[in-house]
Image: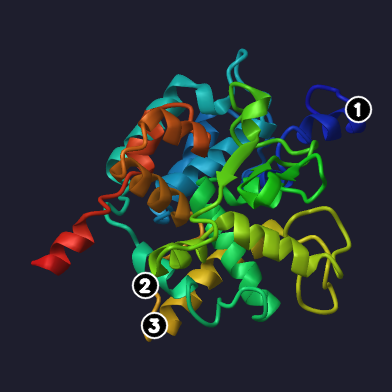
Amino acid sequence: MARGLPSNVVATIQSARAASTRGLYAFKWHAFELWCQERELVPFQCSIVDILTFLQELFERGLSFSTIKVYLAAISACHEGFGGLSPGAHPLTTRFMKGVRRLKPVFRPTVPPWDLCMVLGALCAPPFEPLESVDIKFVSYKTALLLALASAKRVGDLHALSVHPSCTQFAPGDTKVTLCPNATYVPKVLPMSYSSLAFELNSFSPPPFTSEVQQRLHMLCPVRALRTYINRTQDFRRCDQLFVCFAKPVRGRALSKQRLSHWVLEAISIAYSSKGMDLPEGVRAHSTRGIATSWALFKGVPVGDICAAASWASPHTFVRFYRLDVLAPSVAHAV
Protein backbone atom coordinates (compact mmCIF):
# COMPACT_ATOMS: atom_id res chain seq x y z
CA MET A 1 0.00 0.00 0.00
CA ALA A 2 1.02 3.63 -0.51
CA ARG A 3 1.56 4.24 3.21
CA GLY A 4 3.21 0.91 3.92
CA LEU A 5 0.32 -0.45 5.97
CA PRO A 6 -0.09 -4.23 6.30
CA SER A 7 -2.95 -5.71 4.31
CA ASN A 8 -4.85 -6.78 7.45
CA VAL A 9 -4.68 -3.22 8.81
CA VAL A 10 -5.96 -1.89 5.50
CA ALA A 11 -8.85 -4.39 5.61
CA THR A 12 -9.82 -3.20 9.10
CA ILE A 13 -9.70 0.45 8.03
CA GLN A 14 -11.84 -0.29 4.99
CA SER A 15 -14.42 -1.99 7.21
CA ALA A 16 -15.29 1.45 8.57
CA ARG A 17 -17.42 1.80 5.43
CA ALA A 18 -20.47 -0.29 4.66
CA ALA A 19 -19.95 -3.24 2.34
CA SER A 20 -22.16 -1.64 -0.32
CA THR A 21 -20.07 1.55 -0.18
CA ARG A 22 -16.84 -0.41 -0.46
CA GLY A 23 -18.18 -2.23 -3.50
CA LEU A 24 -19.26 1.00 -5.15
CA TYR A 25 -15.93 2.70 -4.45
CA ALA A 26 -14.00 -0.32 -5.75
CA PHE A 27 -15.85 -0.16 -9.07
CA LYS A 28 -15.21 3.58 -9.47
CA TRP A 29 -11.59 3.29 -8.37
CA HIS A 30 -10.99 0.49 -10.87
CA ALA A 31 -12.23 2.75 -13.66
CA PHE A 32 -9.80 5.44 -12.52
CA GLU A 33 -6.96 2.89 -12.35
CA LEU A 34 -7.56 1.86 -15.97
CA TRP A 35 -7.61 5.52 -17.01
CA CYS A 36 -4.29 6.08 -15.25
CA GLN A 37 -2.71 2.95 -16.75
CA GLU A 38 -3.47 4.18 -20.25
CA ARG A 39 -1.51 7.35 -19.42
CA GLU A 40 1.24 5.61 -17.42
CA LEU A 41 0.22 7.35 -14.19
CA VAL A 42 0.33 6.03 -10.62
CA PRO A 43 -3.32 6.20 -9.47
CA PHE A 44 -2.72 6.83 -5.76
CA GLN A 45 0.06 9.38 -6.37
CA CYS A 46 -1.05 11.25 -9.49
CA SER A 47 -1.37 15.05 -9.50
CA ILE A 48 -4.51 17.09 -8.88
CA VAL A 49 -4.34 18.06 -12.57
CA ASP A 50 -4.68 14.41 -13.57
CA ILE A 51 -7.61 13.88 -11.22
CA LEU A 52 -9.46 16.95 -12.48
CA THR A 53 -8.80 15.90 -16.08
CA PHE A 54 -10.39 12.53 -15.34
CA LEU A 55 -13.41 14.19 -13.71
CA GLN A 56 -13.73 16.59 -16.65
CA GLU A 57 -13.93 13.65 -19.05
CA LEU A 58 -16.73 12.18 -16.92
CA PHE A 59 -18.51 15.53 -17.05
CA GLU A 60 -18.18 15.75 -20.85
CA ARG A 61 -19.58 12.20 -21.15
CA GLY A 62 -22.79 13.52 -19.63
CA LEU A 63 -22.53 12.00 -16.15
CA SER A 64 -24.54 13.70 -13.43
CA PHE A 65 -23.14 15.70 -10.54
CA SER A 66 -23.97 12.97 -8.03
CA THR A 67 -22.22 10.29 -10.11
CA ILE A 68 -19.08 12.41 -10.53
CA LYS A 69 -19.16 13.04 -6.78
CA VAL A 70 -19.03 9.28 -6.12
CA TYR A 71 -16.02 8.92 -8.42
CA LEU A 72 -14.30 11.71 -6.50
CA ALA A 73 -15.11 10.08 -3.17
CA ALA A 74 -13.64 6.77 -4.38
CA ILE A 75 -10.46 8.50 -5.52
CA SER A 76 -10.21 10.41 -2.23
CA ALA A 77 -10.53 7.13 -0.31
CA CYS A 78 -7.54 5.57 -2.08
CA HIS A 79 -5.28 8.50 -3.03
CA GLU A 80 -2.49 9.50 -0.63
CA GLY A 81 -3.52 13.16 -0.87
CA PHE A 82 -1.71 16.47 -1.13
CA GLY A 83 -0.04 17.85 1.98
CA GLY A 84 -2.61 16.42 4.34
CA LEU A 85 -5.56 17.23 2.08
CA SER A 86 -7.54 14.55 0.28
CA PRO A 87 -8.28 15.13 -3.43
CA GLY A 88 -11.88 15.94 -2.53
CA ALA A 89 -10.79 18.67 -0.09
CA HIS A 90 -8.32 20.33 -2.47
CA PRO A 91 -9.34 23.96 -3.24
CA LEU A 92 -9.27 23.34 -7.00
CA THR A 93 -11.46 20.26 -6.65
CA THR A 94 -13.95 22.13 -4.49
CA ARG A 95 -14.27 24.89 -7.10
CA PHE A 96 -14.47 22.31 -9.89
CA MET A 97 -17.38 20.50 -8.23
CA LYS A 98 -19.17 23.81 -7.65
CA GLY A 99 -18.81 24.45 -11.37
CA VAL A 100 -20.22 21.01 -12.18
CA ARG A 101 -23.21 21.65 -9.94
CA ARG A 102 -23.86 25.01 -11.59
CA LEU A 103 -23.53 23.61 -15.12
CA LYS A 104 -25.51 20.46 -14.25
CA PRO A 105 -28.02 21.61 -11.63
CA VAL A 106 -29.72 18.91 -9.60
CA PHE A 107 -33.48 18.95 -10.01
CA ARG A 108 -35.71 17.19 -7.53
CA PRO A 109 -39.47 16.71 -7.59
CA THR A 110 -41.55 19.10 -5.52
CA VAL A 111 -44.69 16.95 -5.45
CA PRO A 112 -45.02 13.34 -4.23
CA PRO A 113 -44.10 10.77 -6.92
CA TRP A 114 -47.02 8.54 -5.87
CA ASP A 115 -50.38 8.91 -4.13
CA LEU A 116 -50.05 7.97 -0.46
CA CYS A 117 -53.79 8.09 0.29
CA MET A 118 -54.58 5.76 -2.60
CA VAL A 119 -51.87 3.29 -1.60
CA LEU A 120 -52.99 3.24 2.04
CA GLY A 121 -56.54 2.58 0.89
CA ALA A 122 -55.35 -0.37 -1.19
CA LEU A 123 -53.48 -1.83 1.80
CA CYS A 124 -56.83 -2.20 3.58
CA ALA A 125 -58.23 -4.54 0.90
CA PRO A 126 -57.23 -7.75 -0.95
CA PRO A 127 -54.61 -8.92 -1.73
CA PHE A 128 -53.20 -7.38 1.48
CA GLU A 129 -56.14 -8.30 3.73
CA PRO A 130 -57.09 -10.28 5.72
CA LEU A 131 -53.54 -10.15 7.02
CA GLU A 132 -53.80 -13.38 8.99
CA SER A 133 -54.59 -15.57 5.96
CA VAL A 134 -53.28 -13.94 2.76
CA ASP A 135 -50.09 -15.17 1.09
CA ILE A 136 -47.00 -14.45 3.17
CA LYS A 137 -45.50 -12.33 0.39
CA PHE A 138 -48.30 -9.78 0.74
CA VAL A 139 -47.82 -9.73 4.51
CA SER A 140 -44.10 -9.15 3.91
CA TYR A 141 -44.65 -6.35 1.39
CA LYS A 142 -47.25 -4.59 3.54
CA THR A 143 -45.16 -4.79 6.71
CA ALA A 144 -42.08 -3.42 4.98
CA LEU A 145 -44.00 -0.48 3.50
CA LEU A 146 -45.85 0.39 6.72
CA LEU A 147 -42.63 0.32 8.74
CA ALA A 148 -40.89 2.50 6.16
CA LEU A 149 -43.72 5.05 6.24
CA ALA A 150 -44.33 5.03 10.00
CA SER A 151 -40.65 5.32 10.93
CA ALA A 152 -39.28 7.44 8.04
CA LYS A 153 -36.14 5.30 8.29
CA ARG A 154 -33.74 4.39 5.52
CA VAL A 155 -34.02 0.92 4.03
CA GLY A 156 -30.62 0.19 5.55
CA ASP A 157 -31.96 1.01 9.03
CA LEU A 158 -34.96 -1.27 8.51
CA HIS A 159 -32.73 -4.01 7.13
CA ALA A 160 -30.72 -4.02 10.39
CA LEU A 161 -33.77 -4.70 12.59
CA SER A 162 -33.88 -7.97 14.51
CA VAL A 163 -36.52 -10.17 16.17
CA HIS A 164 -34.16 -10.86 19.06
CA PRO A 165 -35.88 -9.95 22.37
CA SER A 166 -33.25 -7.28 23.00
CA CYS A 167 -34.15 -5.56 19.71
CA THR A 168 -37.93 -6.02 19.39
CA GLN A 169 -40.12 -5.46 22.43
CA PHE A 170 -43.92 -5.36 22.28
CA ALA A 171 -45.83 -3.65 25.08
CA PRO A 172 -48.66 -5.56 26.80
CA GLY A 173 -51.63 -5.82 24.49
CA ASP A 174 -49.44 -4.80 21.54
CA THR A 175 -50.23 -1.15 22.24
CA LYS A 176 -46.76 -0.23 21.01
CA VAL A 177 -43.46 -1.75 19.94
CA THR A 178 -39.88 -0.61 20.48
CA LEU A 179 -37.41 -1.50 17.74
CA CYS A 180 -33.66 -1.14 17.46
CA PRO A 181 -31.06 -2.55 15.04
CA ASN A 182 -28.68 -5.38 15.81
CA ALA A 183 -25.61 -4.51 17.87
CA THR A 184 -23.21 -4.67 14.91
CA TYR A 185 -25.10 -2.16 12.76
CA VAL A 186 -23.34 1.09 11.89
CA PRO A 187 -25.83 3.60 10.41
CA LYS A 188 -25.08 5.82 7.45
CA VAL A 189 -25.36 8.88 9.69
CA LEU A 190 -24.31 8.44 13.32
CA PRO A 191 -26.88 10.01 15.67
CA MET A 192 -25.94 12.30 18.56
CA SER A 193 -26.78 9.45 20.96
CA TYR A 194 -26.54 5.75 20.23
CA SER A 195 -29.84 5.21 22.03
CA SER A 196 -31.60 7.24 19.34
CA LEU A 197 -31.11 4.30 16.98
CA ALA A 198 -34.10 2.77 18.76
CA PHE A 199 -37.57 3.98 17.83
CA GLU A 200 -41.08 3.40 19.04
CA LEU A 201 -44.30 2.81 17.13
CA ASN A 202 -47.74 3.07 18.69
CA SER A 203 -50.77 1.01 17.71
CA PHE A 204 -53.42 2.63 15.49
CA SER A 205 -57.02 2.45 16.75
CA PRO A 206 -56.73 -0.83 18.69
CA PRO A 207 -59.92 -2.86 19.25
CA PRO A 208 -62.67 -2.71 20.34
CA PHE A 209 -63.82 -0.58 17.41
CA THR A 210 -66.63 1.97 17.63
CA SER A 211 -66.77 2.71 13.91
CA GLU A 212 -65.71 1.39 10.50
CA VAL A 213 -63.16 4.19 10.31
CA GLN A 214 -61.36 2.89 13.40
CA GLN A 215 -61.40 -0.64 12.03
CA ARG A 216 -59.96 0.60 8.75
CA LEU A 217 -57.24 2.58 10.53
CA HIS A 218 -56.28 -0.54 12.48
CA MET A 219 -55.64 -2.30 9.17
CA LEU A 220 -52.88 0.27 8.61
CA CYS A 221 -51.36 -0.28 12.05
CA PRO A 222 -47.61 -1.04 11.71
CA VAL A 223 -47.62 -2.74 15.14
CA ARG A 224 -50.37 -5.15 14.01
CA ALA A 225 -48.58 -5.82 10.72
CA LEU A 226 -45.27 -6.41 12.50
CA ARG A 227 -46.78 -8.79 15.06
CA THR A 228 -48.55 -10.75 12.32
CA TYR A 229 -45.40 -10.90 10.17
CA ILE A 230 -43.25 -12.18 13.05
CA ASN A 231 -45.85 -14.80 13.99
CA ARG A 232 -46.26 -16.05 10.43
CA THR A 233 -42.51 -16.31 9.76
CA GLN A 234 -41.65 -17.91 13.09
CA ASP A 235 -41.93 -21.49 11.81
CA PHE A 236 -39.54 -21.10 8.89
CA ARG A 237 -37.12 -18.29 9.81
CA ARG A 238 -33.48 -19.34 10.13
CA CYS A 239 -32.02 -16.16 11.63
CA ASP A 240 -32.81 -13.24 13.95
CA GLN A 241 -32.95 -10.64 11.19
CA LEU A 242 -36.46 -9.21 11.06
CA PHE A 243 -37.06 -9.51 7.34
CA VAL A 244 -36.42 -12.94 5.86
CA CYS A 245 -36.93 -14.50 2.44
CA PHE A 246 -40.28 -16.22 1.83
CA ALA A 247 -39.49 -18.03 -1.43
CA LYS A 248 -37.74 -21.37 -1.79
CA PRO A 249 -34.93 -22.44 -1.71
CA VAL A 250 -33.78 -19.52 0.51
CA ARG A 251 -36.96 -19.44 2.59
CA GLY A 252 -36.24 -18.19 6.10
CA ARG A 253 -32.79 -16.80 5.36
CA ALA A 254 -31.82 -13.17 5.90
CA LEU A 255 -33.17 -10.84 3.23
CA SER A 256 -30.72 -8.58 1.41
CA LYS A 257 -31.05 -4.81 1.59
CA GLN A 258 -31.68 -4.66 -2.16
CA ARG A 259 -34.56 -7.14 -1.86
CA LEU A 260 -36.05 -5.15 1.00
CA SER A 261 -36.09 -2.08 -1.24
CA HIS A 262 -37.84 -4.21 -3.85
CA TRP A 263 -40.46 -5.24 -1.27
CA VAL A 264 -41.31 -1.61 -0.50
CA LEU A 265 -41.57 -0.78 -4.18
CA GLU A 266 -43.57 -3.93 -4.90
CA ALA A 267 -46.11 -3.02 -2.21
CA ILE A 268 -46.68 0.35 -3.88
CA SER A 269 -46.87 -1.24 -7.34
CA ILE A 270 -49.41 -3.89 -6.26
CA ALA A 271 -51.48 -1.20 -4.54
CA TYR A 272 -51.66 0.72 -7.81
CA SER A 273 -52.51 -2.36 -9.88
CA SER A 274 -55.24 -3.39 -7.42
CA LYS A 275 -56.87 -0.03 -8.13
CA GLY A 276 -56.53 -0.53 -11.89
CA MET A 277 -53.81 2.09 -12.19
CA ASP A 278 -50.27 2.09 -13.57
CA LEU A 279 -47.37 2.83 -11.25
CA PRO A 280 -45.85 6.26 -12.04
CA GLU A 281 -42.40 6.18 -13.61
CA GLY A 282 -39.31 6.67 -11.49
CA VAL A 283 -40.80 5.58 -8.13
CA ARG A 284 -38.13 4.38 -5.69
CA ALA A 285 -38.30 2.81 -2.26
CA HIS A 286 -36.37 5.79 -0.86
CA SER A 287 -39.34 8.03 -1.73
CA THR A 288 -41.14 6.85 1.42
CA ARG A 289 -38.90 9.12 3.52
CA GLY A 290 -39.85 12.30 1.72
CA ILE A 291 -43.55 11.43 1.57
CA ALA A 292 -43.82 10.34 5.21
CA THR A 293 -41.95 13.32 6.63
CA SER A 294 -43.74 15.84 4.39
CA TRP A 295 -47.13 14.57 5.54
CA ALA A 296 -45.89 14.64 9.14
CA LEU A 297 -44.94 18.31 8.72
CA PHE A 298 -48.34 19.08 7.19
CA LYS A 299 -50.05 17.41 10.17
CA GLY A 300 -48.17 19.64 12.60
CA VAL A 301 -45.25 17.49 13.75
CA PRO A 302 -42.32 19.78 14.75
CA VAL A 303 -39.41 19.83 12.31
CA GLY A 304 -37.03 18.85 15.10
CA ASP A 305 -38.99 15.67 15.80
CA ILE A 306 -39.10 14.86 12.08
CA CYS A 307 -35.33 15.23 11.73
CA ALA A 308 -34.73 13.08 14.83
CA ALA A 309 -36.96 10.30 13.47
CA ALA A 310 -35.34 10.38 10.03
CA SER A 311 -31.78 10.75 11.43
CA TRP A 312 -31.14 14.09 9.73
CA ALA A 313 -28.56 16.28 11.41
CA SER A 314 -30.36 19.52 10.56
CA PRO A 315 -33.65 20.78 9.07
CA HIS A 316 -31.61 21.94 6.05
CA THR A 317 -31.39 18.36 4.77
CA PHE A 318 -35.14 17.88 5.03
CA VAL A 319 -36.02 21.21 3.42
CA ARG A 320 -33.50 20.95 0.60
CA PHE A 321 -33.83 17.32 -0.42
CA TYR A 322 -37.00 15.74 0.99
CA ARG A 323 -39.82 18.19 1.67
CA LEU A 324 -42.67 17.80 -0.80
CA ASP A 325 -45.82 19.80 -1.45
CA VAL A 326 -48.28 17.14 -0.33
CA LEU A 327 -51.25 19.45 -0.93
CA ALA A 328 -50.53 20.13 -4.59
CA PRO A 329 -52.24 16.98 -6.01
CA SER A 330 -55.30 17.58 -3.81
CA VAL A 331 -55.66 21.21 -4.86
CA ALA A 332 -55.33 20.32 -8.54
CA HIS A 333 -57.91 17.56 -8.19
CA ALA A 334 -60.32 19.89 -6.39
CA VAL A 335 -60.04 22.54 -9.09
Tell me which residue sits at (46%, 55%) in the image.
288
10 Å crowding of disc 3: few (<14), some (14-19), many (20+): few
Residue 231 x/y as whole percent: 76, 64
Q: Are marks 2 and 3 in contact (CB under 8 Å)?
A: no
Tell me which residue sits at (82%, 47%) in the image.
164
Q: Can see residue 272?
A: yes
Q: Quadrant of the N terminus?
A: top right
Secondary element under disc 1, as helix, strand or loop, is: loop
Question: Of the residues shown, which amino acid type is indicated by label 3?
Answer: Lys
Residue 152 x/y as whole percent: 50, 46
**Residue corresponding to mark 1:** 6
Question: Sequence order check: which comes first, mark 2 or mark 3?
Answer: 3
Q: Are marks 3 and 1 in contact (CB under 8 Å)?
A: no
In the rendered image, the vertical position of residue 8 relative to residue 221, given as above or below: above
Tell me which residue sits at (30%, 54%) in the image.
109
**For the residues marked 2 and 3, what is the alpha-carbon distance in whole angstroms?**
13 Å
Front position in the image: 80 or 123: 123
Front position in the image: 33 or 89: 89
Horizontal side of 130 relative to 231 (left or right) equals left
Secondary element under disc 3, as helix, strand or loop, is: loop
Front position in the image: 32 or 125: 125
Number of dots carrying numbers: 3
Query: Can you tell which quarter of the image residue 86 is in?
Result: top right
Front position in the image: 66 or 288: 288
Q: Which mark is residue 275?
A: 3
